[in-house]
Image (tube, rainbow, N blue to C red):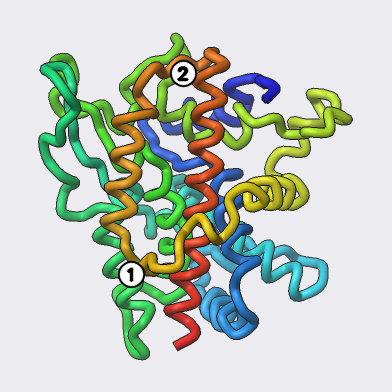
Amino acid sequence: MKTVRIVSTFAFAAIAAFPSATFAWGSSGHRIVAAIAWKELGATTRKRIIAILKSAPANSEIAKLRPSSGADSVRNEQWFIAVSTWPDLVRDPARLSHTYHRRVWHYADHFWRDDDGPAHEVKGPPPKNAVERLTVLVADLRKPGSTEFPRAVELAWVIHLMGDIHQPLHNASRISKGQLEGDGGGNGMALTNSLDLHTFWDHIPDEVFESDPSNKRTKKESAAFEGTPEYVEMWRATITKTFGPRVVGKSQSVDAFERWSLEGAKIAEDSVYRGAKAKDAAYQARVAAMSNRAMALAGHRLAGLLTSVFSE
């Protein structure tokens, strides 16, 4: 695997704007997860999802994410993919949709420590967390009547949070003698003077993977390619070729949110924190494989979840 730059201009901009933010996978990762899911959804499920998104209140600004031109089928797919990033977009206080921002919904940190021996969990997540919210929001979406929030808003959160709980560092926060309240899922673990572990992981799709395997693009062209529909589709196809739906397993529940979060916490403790070095080729190769599998699981499981909710 060819190693490319670790932090792009976009990544630095995100760090500057949100110094303590916890974005899972960044925009590209969430889009890849959503793209994997969309390809597996049936026509009835897609139709119901789009109908819900069209009902979004104006102040949510969800409608603005739908492309303004192109065939309806393409616009719907790209809208669904774009909506996966909406809960991160509403962090911006300047947006009308900021009223829907909920910082603590993005993670379900299991607090653990290993400075006095083997890794062990000290305490679980706070009462309101990504797993708890997924449970509530999915139950709401299954109801025929009123919900706590507009259905389109709840759907957008579900799509996004399914990506969040598959990012290992959204499920674990290491406690140490110097960080008794935890390190914020790696936000407090510096890899370089300008890069922490969490930010490194958030941008793995863009920063560790080679964005153009054909090597036909210049660095500038490759940077412009990142995040485009073609880029997302390239990575969807690449990831699912290795990690197809079979990676989920036939006996898996469609809403085992707590178990999936615990899986992520275990991966973080055993593999993400261990030997973490931003410019280490062996670590990059290891986390690239883990990240690919995690995004595939998130996408396949999201498809199974939405099918169960909207095909009943």
- 209 w.r.t. 165: above or below: above
Q: Quadrant of residue 176?
A: top left
Answer with left or right where residue 255 lies relative to residue 284: left
User: Which residue is pictured at 79% across the width and 23% down the height?
Assistant: 219
Residue sitting nearer the eye, 93 or 277: 277
Tag 1: amino acid: Leu
Q: Can residue 86 be seen in this snapshot? A: no
Q: How far across and how far down the image is residue 25, in percent? A: 50, 41
- 253 w.r.t. 5: above or below: below
Answer with left or right where residue 216 lies relative to residue 242: right
Disc 1 secondary structure class: helix
User: Which residue is pictured at 85% across the width and 25% down the height?
Assistant: 218
Residue located beneath label 1 in the image? 137
Residue located beneath label 2 in the image? 195
Task: Look at the numbered discs 1 and 2 and tell me whether their residues touch, using CB distance below 8 Å.
Answer: no
Q: How far across and how far down the image is residue 157, in percent? A: 42, 61
Q: Residues within 10 Å of mark 2 (few under 14, many from 20)?
A: some
Q: How far across and how far down the image is residue 160, in percent? A: 46, 56
Name the outermost residue toward the right.
216
Tag 2: amino acid: Leu
CA distance for labels 1 and 2: 34 Å
- 89 w.r.t. 97: above or below: above
Disc 2 secondary structure class: strand
User: Which residue is pictured at 46% across the width and 45% down the height?
Assistant: 92
Q: Can residue 62 be seen in this snapshot? A: yes
